[in-house]
Amino acid sequence: MFITKVIEELLAWVEESGFNEKLTIEMLSEKSGYSRGHIQKAFKDETGMTFGSYVRGRKLTRAAFMLKATSLSISHIVKELKFQSYQSFGRAFRKQFRTSPMQYRKSKSWDVSSSIPLLFLDGIPEHRYVRLPKFFDESGDCVDAEIYHFHPAASALRLAAIGGMQKTEGGIINFFNFKASVKKENHVSIYLKTIYVSEDADISTVLASLADDAQGKKDMQLFAEFSFDGASDEAQKFTQSIYTKSFPINKVGMVDRFLIEIVTPKGDNRVEMKTYIPIVFPIKKREK
């Protein structure tokens, strides 16, 4: 499966480019060492998409992220991602996401169902749907991060909280959210509230008490539940694949509320983690 490995490396190269240059099949050929026709066919066979369609879809997906996570102007996003013009970007965005860039930005939910998933060729996280209390909406600790160095799975605050589990043998509960920074237009504000749970405490009981203290158990929200059990340094990659692969493939959107992450140390640098992300099934309306 040597060619599969080559395609995986090319997919990583596409992401690392930041889409701030025009990626062509000629560049793909030069990068891989294969002829233009051979690598074009291999890419289509492995991913199910032409190289041009994949790059265009991922670039628009990146634009959608920037619209929701930053206050950058649409004209800045067009320039940054090297779209030909404001008008061509608007047409392409509307075709993929079935709404205009401005309407997408203003939406209260984050519809990722039309995003092109990150096609690294490993597995897709399994999930189930559950209903949980909405908990609190007040912000926790907050830091601003540059958009180009931020991913929901790789928040410095979140990783610091997981790294600080030596404070307890029981585990931690993270309440995590992010939105466009009001201070800097190319930054995202990351909010995190971390609760350390003692070894003799029952995490589910602690979680229930937090719901009682907040809005009560009758105020429920649909969540997607993901489970992980493995090496702690693999947890970040697992969480990232939820956003970049599972959500687009399963056609769901995220609600602007705190997600919940329960992490329990298992010894030998292993953790058990359950992630609950508030979701909505978007209603698709093709605009005229």
Image (cartoon, grey):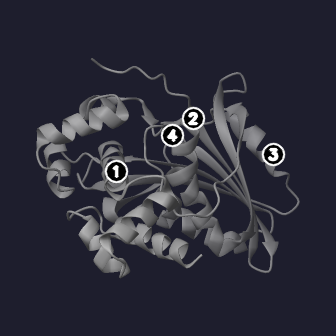
**Mark nearer the N terminus (4 vs 3):** 4
**Mark nearer the N terminus (1 vs 3):** 1
**Mark nearer the N terminus (1 vs 4):** 1
* Secondary structure of the residue carrying numbered label 3: helix
Percent across and percent down for residue 238 are 62, 62
- Pointer 2: residues within 10 angstroms few (<14), some, or many (20+)? many
Q: Quadrant of the image for the C terminus?
A: top left
Q: Residue at x 79, y 80 (%)?
A: 268
* Secondary structure of the residue carrying numbered label 1: helix
Q: CA distance from mark 1 to mark 3?
A: 45 Å
Q: Is residue 95 left or right of residue 239?
A: left
Residue beneath label 4, please? 138
User: Which residue type does callout 4 highlight?
Assistant: Glu
The dot on residue 53 is 1
* Secondary structure of the residue carrying numbered label 2: strand
Percent across and percent down for residue 103 are 29, 28
User: Which residue type does callout 3 highlight?
Assistant: Ser
- Pointer 1: residues within 10 angstroms few (<14), some, or many (20+)? few
Q: Residue at x 63, y 54 (%)?
A: 124
The dot on residue 279 is 2
Disc nearest the viewer among 4 and 3: 3
User: Which residue type does callout 1 highlight?
Assistant: Ser
Disc nearest the viewer among 1 and 4: 1
Q: Residue at x 43, y 52 (%)?
A: 49
- Pointer 3: residues within 10 angstroms few (<14), some, or many (20+)? few
* Secondary structure of the residue carrying numbered label 4: loop
